[in-house]
Image: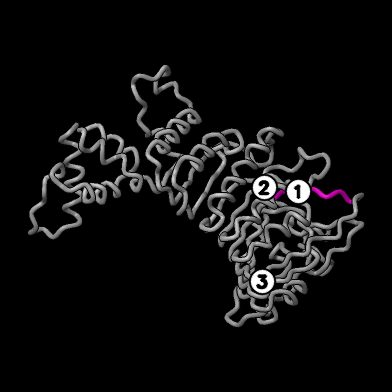
C-alpha cells in the first residue's frame, strides 16, 4: 500500500519535472510540496494515501486539499471499518453525510461543490458543509437530482421545502459576495425566488423547476418570483426550465422580463410560459426550444402576442435566436421568413404558430 501511494506521487512529480532532474522521495518532501502534489489527486485517492503513514495522514488535514467536491462519486469515499453498517450497505445519503463530516473536521476550503444529490431530503448534509467548512471562496455550486428522478413528478414536502430554503439562507449569509455560478433544481415559491435574488454576485444561474402541480394555490411561477431572480445585478447567463399549466379560466397578463445585465437567456424545455414583454438591452443570445409542446402557449381566451416583435423591440443586441444567428445585432437583420419563424416553435401568434397547430 505504501509503495503504491509513493509511486502515485512519484509519477505526478515526474510529469511536472524535466527528465534530467532527480526526483525526491515523497516522504522527504517539505509539507508544502506534498500538499502541492496531493492537490492533483481525487479526494478518494488522497484518503487512500493518508493511510500510508502518519506523515501523509497529517498532510491530509491541510484544508486547501479539499477544494472541489463531487458528491456523485461518493461511492469511492472509503468507509471506516469500525462503523455499525458495512460499506456495501451504506446508502448514498449516509455516505455523503460521512463525507461532509470528514470535510468539516478538516475545515475544507471549498471552492466548488457539484454532483447528484437530493438537496430537499439531504439538506442537513449540505448545511453541514456550509456551516463547518471554509466557504469564503465558494464560487460554484452545481447540483442535479439523482439519476432516475423525474422533475415532473418530484414533489417536496412542506418540511423539505423549509430545509431547502434554510440551505439557501446559509448560502446568502456566507457566500452572497463570492458565489458566481449556481445550478440547481428549485420549487416555484416566492420565498425561494427571493433568496435566490439575494445572491448578489451570481453571474451564471441554471434553474430546473420541479413540478408546480403540487401547489394547488399557485400551479405556476408567479411574475414576482421571476422579477426577484432577474433583479440580480451581475447576472449574465440565465437558464430556466419549467413545465407549467395556466388555466384559461384564470386571468394571466403574461410575464414582463427585464434585466440590465443579462446577456444570455435559455428557456430550455419550458412549456406554456406566456410572455408579454422583454426588456434586455444587453441580451445577445435567446434560446427557447421545446419539440413536444410550444414554448409560448396561449389559448382561446388569450391572444398570443408576436414574440418576434417583442424580441425586436426589447432586445436590440440580439444575435442568436435558437439555431439562427446574425453577424449584425438586431432581429430585423436575421431576415427570417415566416416559414422559418414557424419552424422555430418559438411564437404562437396567428402568423407564426407552427403549422401543426393551424390544422
Mark nearer the viewer, 3 or 1: 3
Q: Quadrant of residue 159?
A: top right
Q: Is residue 241 depicted above or below 256 in this figure?
A: above
> SS class of the residue under badge 2?
strand
Q: Residues within 10 Å of mark 1 (few under 14, many from 20)?
A: some
Seen from the viewer's position, the closer of residues 177 and 223 is: 177
Sequence-wise first label, 3 or 1: 1
Give the spatial CA distance, label 3 vs label 1. Answer: 27 Å
Q: Quadrant of the C terminus?
A: bottom right
Residue 319 appears at what percent x and percent y? 61, 75
The residue pinned by badge 2 equals 209
Mark nearer the viewer, 1 or 2: 2
Task: Look at the image and tell me whether residue 19 can be seen.
Answer: yes
Q: Quadrant of residue 44?
A: top left
Q: Is residue 272 left or right of residue 105?
A: right
Q: Which residues are magenta?
A: 242-248
Query: What residue appears at the point 37 percent right and 39 percent down from the top-left corner?
Result: 106
Residue 191 appears at what percent x and percent y? 72, 47
Sequence-wise first label, 3 or 2: 2
Mark nearer the viewer, 3 or 2: 3
Q: Is residue 108 depicted above or below 75 in this figure?
A: below
Q: Is residue 29 left or right of residue 224?
A: left
Seen from the viewer's position, the closer of residues 275 and 181 is: 181
Task: Look at the image and tell me whether residue 324 can be seen.
Answer: no
Give the spatial CA distance, label 1 vs label 2. Answer: 10 Å
| Residue 260, label in figure | 3
Q: What kind of secondary structure does the magenta stretch mostly adopt?
A: loop
Q: Is residue 325 magenta?
A: no
Q: Are marks 3 and 1 in contact (CB under 8 Å)?
A: no
The residue pinned by badge 1 equals 244
Amino acid at each position: 500500500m505504501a509503495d503504491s501511494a509513493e509511486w502515485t506521487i512519484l509519477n505526478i512529480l515526474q510529469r511536472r519535472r524535466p527528465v534530467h532532474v532527480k526526483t525526491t522521495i515523497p516522504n522527504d518532501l517539505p509539507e508544502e510540496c506534498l500538499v502541492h502534489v496531493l492537490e492533483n489527486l481525487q479526494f478518494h485517492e488522497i484518503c487512500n494515501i493518508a493511510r500510508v503513514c502518519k506523515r501523509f495522514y497529517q498532510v491530509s488535514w491541510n484544508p486547501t486539499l479539499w477544494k472541489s467536491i463531487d458528491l456523485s462519486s461518493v461511492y469511492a469515499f472509503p468507509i471506516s471499518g469500525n462503523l455499525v453498517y458495512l460499506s456495501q450497505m451504506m446508502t448514498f445519503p449516509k455516505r455523503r453525510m460521512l463525507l461532509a463530516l470528514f470535510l468539516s473536521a478538516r475545515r475544507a476550503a471549498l471552492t466548488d461543490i457539484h454532483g447528484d444529490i437530493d438537496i430537499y431530503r439531504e439538506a442537513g448534509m449540505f448545511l453541514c458543509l456550509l456551516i463547518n467548512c471554509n466557504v469564503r471562496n465558494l464560487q460554484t455550486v452545481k447540483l442535479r437530482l439523482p439519476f432516475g428522478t423525474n422533475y415532473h413528478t418530484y414533489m417536496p414536502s412542506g418540511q423539505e421545502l423549509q430545509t431547502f430554503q434554510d440551505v439557501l439562507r446559509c448560502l446568502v449569509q456566507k457566500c452572497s459576495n463570492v458565489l458566481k455560478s449556481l445550478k440547481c433544481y428549485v420549487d416555484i415559491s416566492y420565498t425561494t425566488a427571493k433568496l435566490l435574488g439575494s445572491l448578489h454576485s451570481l453571474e451564471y444561474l441554471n434553474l430546473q423547476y420541479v413540478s408546480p402541480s403540487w401547489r394547488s394555490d399557485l400551479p405556476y411561477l408567479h411574475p414576482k418570483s421571476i422579477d426577484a431572480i432577474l433583479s440580480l445585478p451581475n447576472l449574465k447567463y440565465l437558464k430556466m426550465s419549467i413545465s407549467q399549466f395556466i388555466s384559461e379560466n384564470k386571468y394571466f397578463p403574461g410575464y414582463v422580463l427585464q434585466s440590465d445585465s443579462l446577456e444570455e437567456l435559455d428557456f430550455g424545455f419550458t412549456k406554456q410560459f406566456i410572455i408579454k414583454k422583454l426588456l434586455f438591452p444587453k441580451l445577445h443570445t435567446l434560446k427557447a426550444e421545446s419539440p413536444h409542446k410550444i414554448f409560448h402557449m396561449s389559448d382561446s381566451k388569450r391572444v398570443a402576442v408576436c414574440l418576434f416583435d417583442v424580441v425586436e423591440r426589447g432586445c436590440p443586441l440580439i444575435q442568436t435566436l435558437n439555431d439562427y444567428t446574425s453577424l449584425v445585432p438586431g432581429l430585423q437583420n436575421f431576415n427570417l421568413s415566416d416559414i422559418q419563424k414557424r419552424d422555430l416553435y418559438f411564437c404562437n401568434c396567428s402568423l407564426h404558430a407552427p403549422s401543426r397547430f393551424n390544422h
